[in-house]
Amino acid sequence: DQQVKQNSPSLSVQEGRISILNCDYTNSMFDYFLWYKKYPAEGPTFLISISSIKDKNEDGRFTVFLNKSAKHLSLHIVPSQPGDSAVYFCAGGRAAGNKLTFGGGTRVLVKP
Amino acid sequence: DAGITQSPRHKVTETGTPVTLRCHQTENHRYMYWYRQDPGHGLRLIHYSYGVKDTDKGEVSDGYSVSRSKTEDFLLTLESATSSQTSVYFCAISEPPDRAGANVLTFGAGSRLTVL
């Protein structure tokens, strides 16, 4: 039972355009969500988070949107840069616990 | 890597042999985790620890055991490795939640294990 799903395994976008990564979840008990970025042969690194009581959080070129009624979140990267080429994971967590549940990841390729 | 060292970084072993992966942190963080990454499955939690000698199972704990005798070290043991345990293993650490209430995990660089 996958509680967090990223239905698009890959995404290709032109440099300077917007990248939109999607994530769906089934566990309505999640209190927050995070996005991680992963380069080959490295560990995932934290990008941005959002509380379940918010619908948007912005940090530079990265914006995360949360639609609780649809159990859906998305990460927007504007403008996309070649260095953004990586695998992106979304994850959900509960405030009462300390574990994260991750989606399967989306590989992003930004073409120069 | 924020003071997290995983060893070995690469290991090839044979089915049935025991394997131990080590995670060492210099951040004095209370929580430590072991995840595995497999194509299509993302990162799945194997075991985690919320203090010395305090550990608990994650979603894919079968075939794995852990130990934490010191704050800085978290060991993952495969008692008898199987081919299905071929994976990349990531250790992570965390402290209390940030301002958004999120428990942000910091990951090590990973240990690639191949079981033949």
Image: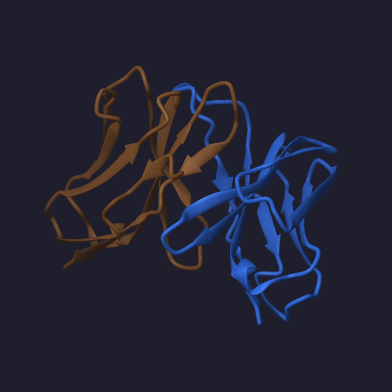
Residue A59 appears anywhere in the view: no
Quadrant of the drawing holding the N terminus of chain B: bottom right
Q: Which residue lies most toward the front here? A: A1
A16 with respect to B35 (left or right): left
Q: Which residue lies most toward the right here? A: B69
A41 with respect to B32 (left or right): left
Write the residue at 18% across / 67% down: A111
Image coords of residue A4 (percent x, y):
40, 41
Tell me which corner region of the image, top left, top right, bottom left or bottom right, holds residue B39: bottom left
Q: Which residue lies most toward the top here? A: A53
Q: Which chain is brown?
A: A
Write the residue at 28% across / 51% down: A7
Q: Nearer the viewer, residue A13 or A58?
A: A13
> Can you say whether B45 is above or below B81 in the image?
above
> Can you say whether B81 is above or below B101 in the image?
below
Write the residue at 20% across / 53% down: A80
Quadrant of the drawing holding the C terminus of chain B: bottom right
Q: Nearer the viewer, residue A93 or B2?
A: A93
A13 with respect to A47 (left or right): left
> Can you say whether B32 is above or below B14 in the image?
above
Write the residue at 40% across / 25% down: A28
Label total for image: 0
Tell me, what colour scheme is on the image? by chain
Image coords of residue A31 (percent x, y):
45, 23
Residue A9 appears anywhere in the view: yes
Q: Which chain is blue?
A: B
Image coords of residue A62 (percent x, y):
27, 40
Tell me which corner region of the image, top left, top right, bottom left or bottom right, holds residue B54: top right
Image coords of residue A8 (percent x, y):
26, 55
